[in-house]
Image: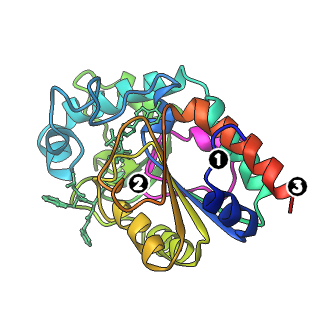
Amino acid sequence: MKVINDPVAIQKLKQAERLVVLTGAGVSAESGIPTFRGEEGLWKKLSPEELASFEAFYNNTAVVSEWYQHRREIIHNTEPNPGHHALAELQKLAPTFDLITQNVDGLHQRAGSSDVVELHGNIMENYCVNCNLQYSQEEFDDIFRHNPNHIPHCYCGGLIRPNVVWFGEALPEESIEKAYQASKQSDVFLSVGTSAQVSPASNLPRVAKQNNSYLIEINKTVTAISDIVDLHLEGLSGEILPMFLDDYKLLRNDK
Ligand code: BV8
Ligand code: ZN
């Protein structure tokens, strides 16, 4: 076995019917997408409240819209990494599998994962705050390019915003409800590449633990939940997840 050597972990993974994975910005870091709170974090200079909130958008529409365009540019030029691909493979092998992500970059879907629960939305989708008209990224780019002061207006005159959940905004009811149910019913819960500082997503590992799920964390450092996990695998998710997948195949065949 490459990374799963703990006998309890081996037993739990052998028996597990329901595997739930929660991912954060760390799984996309090796694709070249900056995380939020790390040393190279997006929010090193400007704080999240100054950028990822409706108030910031409303008061500083051009700056916030440019920030999202900048992030879309980065995402557009990246590829899923081996960690994303390993999770897509894992989904095919586990009896029941739920992938819950805090990321808005869509890389899990591009790697082949399906039924991804996007707790914080998707940065490539946009809608009008006034009439709710949806805009594809191409349509948005066109409006943005033709608007010299970078204030993206809908045909109805309203402002067009990214389809992401900002601080102080409720998560999509259906997504968070599905995530809670899956976490509660999980046999093994993997928390990968998240600092576990943003609620309500950060409640999910705790809900899993309270319901006797076996908690595994993959992160390059310790996090806010490291004290409650059963197994902490330290390192880069792009390296650990493929090894985790290999081990999982071995122990499932050895049932
Ligand atoms: C809500 C927007 C209620 C999209 C994001 C005090 C004051 C004000 C608010 C609060 C407060 N206390 C709590 C709150 C609530 C707040 C919150 O939790 N704030 C935190 C900061 C304290 N939460 C909210 O506001 C949420 N809404 O509660 O609404 C409500 C209810 C009903 C009605 C109305 C309102 C909304 C939360 C969503 C906010 N939106 N993003 C965008 O622009 O992207 S949050 C942002 O953080 C991202 O979505 C991101 O996904 C999320 C979590 O961050 P991580 O993914 O964990 O990333 P981070 O950089 O932190 O960590 C990366 C990790 O990876 C690190 O651990 C690192 O070690 C590791 N790593 C790095 N590289 C690798 C790696 N690991 C492995 N391999 C590697 N290669
Ligand atoms: Zn409109």
Q: Is residue 73 magenta?
A: no
Mark 3 residue type: Asn
Name the mark nearer the viewer: 3 or 2.
Answer: 3
Q: Nearer the viewer, residue 50 or 59?
A: 50
Residue 239: percent from the left, percent from the top? 60, 30
Mark 2 residue type: His
Mark 1 residue type: Ile
* Neighbours of disc 2 within 10 Å: few (<14), some (14-19), many (20+): many
Instruction: In the rendered structure, find residue 4 and report the number of the disc placed on it.
Output: 1
Quadrant in which residue 242 is drawn: top right
Quadrant in which residue 117 is drawn: bottom right
Q: Which residue is under mark 3?
A: 253
Quick one: SS at disc 1?
Answer: loop
Instruction: In the rendered structure, find residue 114 and report the number of the disc placed on it.
Output: none
Residue 62: percent from the left, percent from the top? 21, 31
Q: Quadrant of the N terminus?
A: top right
In the rendered view, would you say 101 is above or below 56?
below
Q: Nearer the viewer, residue 25 or 17?
A: 17
Give the mark nearest the N terminus, 3 or 2. Answer: 2
In the image, is the residue at mark 2 within 8 Å of ligand 1 by its beta carbon?
yes
Q: CA distance from mark 1 to mark 2?
A: 31 Å
Q: Which residue is under mark 2?
A: 120
Magenta segment:
101-123
* Neighbours of disc 3 within 10 Å: few (<14), some (14-19), many (20+): few
Q: Quadrant of the C terminus?
A: bottom right
Q: Nearer the viewer, residue 245 or 50?
A: 245
* Disc 1 and disc 3 in contact, CB within 8 angstroms: no
In the rendered view, would you say 50 is above or below 163?
above
State the residue at coordinates (51%, 25%). 30
Give the mark nearest the N terminus, 1 or 3. Answer: 1
Q: CA distance from mark 3 to mark 2?
A: 36 Å
Quadrant in which residue 112 is drawn: top right
